[in-house]
Image (cartoon, coloured by chain):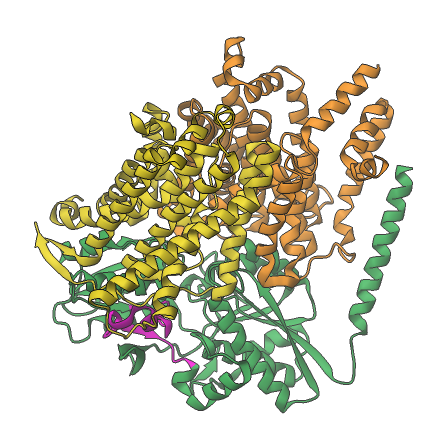
Amino acid sequence: MFEVLIDQFWSLTIAGIALGFIYVLISLGYTMVYGVLRMINFANSEIFMWGTFGTVITNRDIFHYTQTSEPAKGWKLALVLISALLMSMFVAALTAVFVEFVAYRRLRMKGTNRLATLISAIGISIALAELMRLLTDSRPVGSPRVLEKMILTEVWGANIRLDTVVTIIAAAIIYILLERFIQLSRMGKAIRAVSQNEDSAKLMGVNLNRVITVTFLVGGLATGAAGFFYITVFEYTKFNIGFTMGLAAFTAAVLGGIGNIRGAFLGGLSLGLLEVYASAVLGTQWKAVTVFIVLVLVLLFKPNGLFGEAVQQTRA
Amino acid sequence: MNSKIQRSLAVVSAAALVFGVAAATNAQAAVKTYTIAYQGPLSGGEASTGIDEQNAVKYAAKLFMKKNPNIKIKIVSVDDQGDPAVASTVAPGTGSNKSILGVVGPAYSGATIASLPYYKAGGLVMISPSATRVSLTDPASPDFGGPVFHRVVGKDDLQGPALAKYATTGVSSAKVFVFDDQSAYAVPLRGFVEAGLKKVAGATVVGGGDSVPNTTTDFAPTIAKIKTSGATVVIYTGYYSQAAIFIKQLRDSGSTAIFAGGDGVFNQEFPKLAGASAEGSRITGVGGLAGISPKLEADFKKQMGVSSGVYSVESYDAANILLEGIKAGNTTRAKMLKWVKAYKGKSVSGNTIKFDANGDISYGLFAGFTTKNGVLVNTGIIK
Amino acid sequence: MKLRNYWNLRDAGAQLWEGSNRKGRVTIALSAIVLVALLPFAGASFLATPIAAYDAVLVYPVGVFVLMALGLNIVVGKSGMLDLGYVAFFAIGAYTMALMGTLTSLNTWQIMPFGIAFAMVAGVLLGLPTLRLRGDYLAIVTLGFGEIVRLIALNSSWTKGPNGIANIPMPPDIGPLEFKLDDQKVFFWVVVVMILLTIWMIRRLSIRRPGRAWEAIRQDEDVAELLGVHTLKYKIWSFSLGAAVGGAAGVLYASKNLFIAPEMFTLNVSILILACVVFGGIGNIWGVVVGATILGYLPDRIRFISDARLLVFGIVLVVVMNFRPDGLLPRKKREKIGERAQARL
C-alpha cells in the first residue's frame, strides 16, 4: 500500500508542490474576494479557465508555435513565457472585473442577501463556461510546448524538471509580490481596511467601489497566473477544467482559513501534497474523498481553518 | 369563479390537443417525409462525440435523398448529453413520437440503459454506433436491450483481449499496468483487458492499476505507481483527451514504457494534442471513414464542411440500415424493427452486417493503430 | 402605483389569501390543486416541450425539483444554513430504492420509509459534527459530503460502481391508476401529492415551536442561543427533515427512472436545487415552488436553441437575481401583508 509512496516519495513531493502552487494562486482569487465581500466568488473557477486560454492563444496564435515546432530557447523563450503570463493575467483580470461588474455590483449596492449574489455568481460562471464551450466546439485544446521539459538533475531518485522549477519559483515570486502589495501599498491597506470594517473604511474616505474592483482585479491576476502555470505544466485546457481546479482551490482556501492570504498559501500547498500522497497510497479514485474528510476533520478542530479568517490577520 | 376558470382551461387544452394532432397529420405531401432520430451528446462535455456521429448520419441522409428525390428524411436530434439522467427525460419524448421510425444511437451505454425502457415500450428500433457495454446484449443481464437494441460496433469483450494482445505484441514477458478513468465505459473494458492479458503468454498485470477520475489532469501519482511497478507496457482504457495529457507526462517523466489505449483513445485528436509524446502509441480502434475510403471522406468534407469523426463509419452504417428500410417501404415501427432484425447488408468497411438474436453484429474486428509522425496509422486487424 | 400592483402578483396573491375567510381559502387551495393536477393534459399547448416528452418533464425535472427545493428550503430558507450537498440525500434515497427494489421483493411504497429513514440518519450523522460550523464553512463541508456519497457509489462494487443499477421496479398500481412509461400522468400526480404533504408539513412546523426556533436561528444564531433556543437540536431537526424530503424524492426518482448511475448525482444537482430556492424566493414556499418549476422546465422548453440553452440559463440566473434579488416571490413582502392584515383585524 505504501510502497509507491516510499519508492517515489520525492517525485511525488515535487509534483505535489508544483500543483500546490497552482492551487495557491487560484485560491488567492477566492480568498481576496472573500476577505472583502465575505462571499464565495463562485465564478473564480471560470476566471481561471478563461485565463488558461490567454496562454494558449499567445503560444499558438501570436507566436505561432505548433505541436511539432521546437521549444523556444534563450531570449525568445523569456519573451514568449512572459507575454503568455501577462496575457493570461490580463484575460483573467478582465474576466474578474467583468464578473464583479455584471454579477456582483448591482446586488452589492442594493445590499441584498448573500445567497442572491451566490446564485448570480453561479449564473455567470455557467454562462462563462458555456460561452467557452461554444467558442471551442466542446473540444479539448492542446497548447504547443514552449518551455522544454528537460530534466535538470536528479535528487534522491526524483527528476527535477525545468517546468516544475520554473512553476515553483515564478509562482512563489508572484505570491510574494501580491502579498507585499496587500501589506504595503496604499490600495492594499484600503483593501485590508474594508475587510476589517466596511463602514469605518468608508468613513475614512476609502472609495469602496474602487477597492472592490481592485480586489477582483488582483484576485483575477493571481488566478490568471495560475492559468499560465497550468498550461505550462499540463499543456492542455478545456471549457470544463475550471470546475475541478476551482473546487480544489476553494477547498484549499477554506483549509487555510478563507480570507487569509497566508492561509491560502499554506492551504494550497497542503492540498497539493495531500492529493498526490492520497492518490499514491489509496488510488486516485479516493483522492477527492480523502481531501474532503481531511477538510472536515480540520474544520472540526479549527472551525475557521488552519490559520483563521480575514485578510487583516496576515499581520499576525 | 374558479370552476369557470377550470372549465375554460380544460376546453382550451382540449382544443389545443385537437389542433396539435391535426397539424401533425396534415404534413403529408407529394414528397413523402420520414423521420429518424439521432441520439447522443450534442451539448455538454461530451458534445464532440455526438456532433461527429450526427454529422455522419446527416451525411448518409444527404446521399440517400440525392438518390431518392421522392423521399425526404428528417433527422430529429435527441440530445442526451451522454448523461443517463438527461436521457431519461428525452427518451420518453422520442419513444412516444410515433413519426420517428428508428434511432441511430444512443452514443453511450449509460444513456442507452436509461433510454431502453421507453424504446422497448414504444417498439422503437435502435442501432447504436458506439455503445459497447457487454451487458446491453446479454440476455441474462438487467441491462439487456432486446428486442429493440442493436449495435454496429464490436463490444468490450472482443476489444479487451484484442487490446491486450496488441499492446503486448513483441514484448517478451510483458509487465502491464492497466488503469481506467472511472467512467462506465472504461471500468468494464479494463476488466476485459485484464482478463485478456491472462491469455497472453508471459504477460503479467503489475502495480494494482489505478482509477483516475476523468477530470484529473495531474497524473503524477499514477506515474509514480507505474515506475514503482516497473511496468513495460501501460494500458489506459479511458478517452483520448485524458490519454493525451497522461502520455505527455509519462514521457516527460523519462519513462519509455509502451502506451496502449482502446477505442476511447482512438481519435486523430490524440496525436494532435499529445504531439511527439504520442509517437509509437498502440491504439485499438475501428477504421474511420478516412481510413476506409479517402474518396468518401473527401466527399464528406465537401458536403458537411468538416472532417468525419471517430464513429463515422458506424454511424453512417447505422443510418443506412434505417434508410434502406424506409426505401423498402418499412414505414411503421413494427416493420422497421423486423427489417433491422432480418437485415443483411454490406458495411462501408466491406464487412457483412447481420445482427444475431441479441442485437450484435457478426463481425467486430478491431484494428491496431500506431502513431507515426503525428497521425494514427492502421497496422491491420488484430488476430 | 397601479401598474406596479398589477405586476406584483405576489402581493395580490397574498392579499387575496389573507383577505379570504376559511371557505374562500379552501376554494382557492382546491382549485389550485385541480389546476395543477390537470397540467399533464396541457401537453399540446404552448407548454409543450420539444424533444423531451412533456409529461415526463413534468415529473422530472419539474416535479422532483419542486419537491427537493421545498426540502432544501427547510434548511436554507427557514433556518438559514447554506447546504451545497443536498444531492447526497437524493442519492441515498435513490440508491435505497435501487438496491432494495432489485434485491428484495418490496415495492416502492414499502421502500419509501426506508429511503426516508436512511436519508434522515445520514442527515443526523452529517449534522452532529458539522452543524457547529457556520456560513461558508458549512457550505463546503456539505458540498464535500455530497461528493463523498457520489464517489462511494462510484467506487464500490455493491452499488455496481459506474455501471449503475438497472431494472428498478416501477411502483405498483394504485387502484385504477396505472404507472406507465409512455404516459407519466400518474407519476406526476404522486409527485404532486408528495409536494402537498411537504408543504403541509412545513406550514405546520413553521407556526409551531420548530418554525420559530429556525426563524430565530436564521436571524441571529447567537441571540437565539442566548435566549434559550437549543440551536444545535433545531438545526439537526431542520437538516434531517430536509434530508427526509430529499430521500423521498430520490426513492420516487429511482422508481420512475428505472435506472440510476452515480453520474446522476453530481454537485450540479445541489447547485441547481439551491438556484431553484433562491431564484423563486428563499424562505417562501410559493416562491420556491415557482422557482423550481421555472428552472426545471426552462432548459427543456428552450431546447430549440439547443446548443446555447445552458448559456441562456446562466444569463437568466444573473439577470433575474440582479433585478429581483429576493427571488420572484420574496418572503419579506408576504409577511408584511400578513402583518398588515392582522393590523386591520
Find residue A223 and report its horizontal and vertical position in percent: 38, 48
For residue A290, side relative to residue C102 (left or right): left
Q: Please give the name of the residue rendered at 86% of the width and 27% of the height, measured from the top-left corner.
A: C24
The answer to whether residue C160 is above or below residue C307 is above
Q: Is residue B128 visible?
A: no
Relative depth, front residue between B268 and A100: A100
Res A192 → quadrant: top left
Find residue A76 and report its horizontal and vertical position in percent: 25, 67
Find residue A266 and report its horizontal and vertical position in percent: 27, 36
Which hue belongs to chain A?
A: yellow
Which hue belongs to chain C?
A: orange
Question: Which chain is the one coloured green?
Answer: B
For residue A10, side relative to residue B277 (left or right): left
Question: Does the stretch in magenta take in C130?
Answer: no
Q: Is residue A11 visible?
A: yes
For residue A263, side relative to residue C283 (left or right): left
Question: Does the stretch in magenta take in B264?
Answer: yes
The answer to whether residue B80 is above or below residue A312 is below
Relative depth, front residue between B214 and C221: C221
Q: Please give the name of the residue rendered at 26% of the width and 38% of the height, measured from the top-left corner.
A: A270
Span shown in magenta: B261-288
Relative depth, front residue between C179 and A55: A55
Quadrant of the rendering where the N terminus of chain B is positioned: top right
Count of residue discs: 0
Q: Please give the name of the residue rendered at 12% of the width and 68% of the height, measured from the top-left corner.
A: B173
